[in-house]
Amino acid sequence: MKLPLILLSLAMLVHQQVMGQMVEAATHNFNVTSPVNNGPYVAGQILPCTYRLFSNVDTSGLDLLISLQALGGFTPSLPPPLPTATSSTNTTNTNSSGSSSIPTESTNGTYIISDKADVSRTDAFFKQEGNLTYFEHSINFNIPTTAKAGNYKVVFTERTTNANMVIPIEIRPAAPTPSHASGASPSGLGPNHSPGSIFTGTAAPAAPASSSPLLLLLLVLVLALL
């Protein structure tokens, strides 16, 4: 009797933790499961943006803008290249939305993740958890490597109501790429030294063949003729 009660308690605890990570929109027509509130993310890596549309709410008029904004704003030290936002495919937790766009950055550290996020309600995005049914979409945003480290917010804006859902996050600097010393030779030899090769002019000259055996043979032949 104790084992079913323990399993039930664990299931309820997991469900509470998952529900606790969700943030519901003020209009109660969708919620966000990622990014996580105050979660750490790294420049040059993926920032997942996953949102769920409730099946029992009309979302036909939903016009959703998703953006990444630096808190306080700042001017980037270098103009970063335009990164691409890619939708996830065949993953365990999310389905591809196919609605991602190329994000652009303004001078105050704001990136447009999706100017018009996909809000379609088709079988490809349908999910069910117990009595809860919803349509889940996900966008994988590539954080630019030039994004400054600091505090940011991911903003889900409903254009129809001008309501904003704000998820605060932290972006940490990109990991440095290892560099090799210039002019170093893989073999440990200097730049002007290389092992000899029979296919190049750098091969070591062969030692001349000894003439002693040939002279001995000629001497034997001469003695045999005498």
Image (cartoon, rainbow, N blue to C red):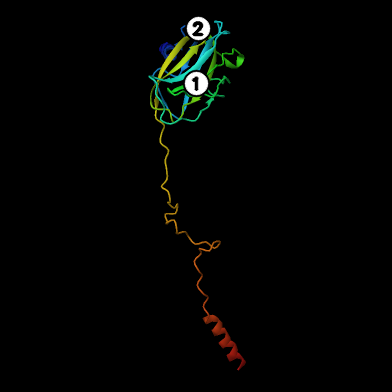
Question: Residue drawn at (53%, 64%), measured in percent from left and top?
Answer: 201
Residue type for callout 2: Thr
User: Is residue 93 visible from the viewing direction of this image?
Assistant: no
Provide the secondary structure element on which disc 1 rests. strand
Foreground pick, 63 / 27: 63
User: Dot 1, how many residues are within 10 Å of its Cα: few (below 14), some (14-19), or many (20+)?
Assistant: many
- From the viewer's side, name the closer residue of 107 and 157: 107
For the N terminus, the image quarter is top left
Look at the numbered discs 1 and 2 and tell me whether their residues touch, using CB distance below 8 Å. no
Frontmost residue, 43 versus 122: 43
Residue 205 in percent (x, y) is at 50, 69
Q: Is residue 215 visible?
A: yes
Q: CA distance from mark 1 to mark 2?
A: 19 Å
Vertically, is 53 above or below 95?
above
The residue indicated by pointer 1 is 112
Instruction: State which quarter of the image contains the C terminus.
Output: bottom right
Residue at image position (53%, 80%) is 211
- In the depicted structure, whether residue 179 falls above or below residue 21: below
Q: Residue 210: horizontal and vertical position, in percent?
A: 51, 78
Q: Secondary structure at mark 2?
A: loop
Q: Nearer the viewer, residue 35 or 128?
A: 35
Q: Characterize the local packing of mark 2: few (<14), some (14-19) or many (20 or more) Cα atoms within 10 angstroms.
A: few
Left or right, residue 90 beside residue 176: right
Q: Position of residue 22 (x, y in %)?
A: 45, 13
Residue 9: give x, y in percent of width and height: 41, 12
Q: Earlier in the sequence, mark 1 or mark 2?
A: 1
Say which quarter of the image contains residue 77: top left
Residue at the disc numbered 2: 161
**Residue found at x 42% / y 16%:** 167
The quarter of the displayed image where residue 3 is located:
top left
Q: Report the amino acid beneath label 1.
A: Ile
